Image (tube, rainbow, N blue to C red):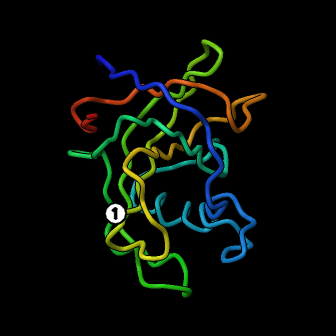
Amino acid sequence: MKWTRIHGRLVEGYRVASGPSADYPFGALDRQRPFFASRGLDLGGYFNGTLNIDISPLAFKLVRPEFTFHSVEWTDLHSPEHFSFSRCKVVFKEVEYDGWVYYPHPETKLRHFQNPSLLEAIAMPIPEIRYGNELDVLVNPGEIEVRE
């Protein structure tokens, strides 16, 4: 596959996926994993949180993600959400790590603003990565559109 390479910087997110946050002390991704697995996406082995990658001034749009799960009822704190996933690779210090672009659909995720220049990825554990580090993400151009 021919990947599209996007340069970005790791930034701190809401800490909802990994926890703890004020709203989700348990970590949302840990609770979501079984729902995704039951629908065909096993995230076992991947880090239990998301990488929030600022790709500005670029923005992205999922156009044909590999997986889209509708109405996932993973918590009783709010209404069901839609999630989409597209394979990706996170490149840090010249090493590629398998991953998935993780996209909670903004129309069902009303509590958080979804910045189109902030790409969330779930990846295999990446040693020594820290907020502020620069990295690249390889995305499938057939599934993700990148624009200025």
- Going by the image, does 120 lie left or right of 24? left
Q: In the rendered picture of this protein, how many numbered marks are placed on residues?
A: 1
The N terminus sits in image quarter:
top left
- Going by the image, does 66 lie left or right of 125? left
Rendered location of residue 104, percent (x, y): 42, 61
Question: Which of the 4 image quarters holds residue 106?
Answer: bottom left
Rendered location of residue 24, percent (x, y): 67, 74
What residue is rendered at 68% in x and 58% in y? Answer: 18
Question: Which of the 4 image quarters holds residue 142?
Answer: top left
Rendered location of residue 10, percent (x, y): 61, 37
What residue is rendered at 53% in x and 28% in y? Answer: 90
What residue is rendered at 66% in x and 77% in y? Answer: 23
Q: Which residue is mark 1?
A: 69
Q: Nearer the viewer, residue 74 or 49?
A: 49
- Going by the image, does 34 lie left or right of 25? left
Q: Residue furthest right?
A: 128
What residue is rendered at 42% in x and 72% in y? Answer: 109
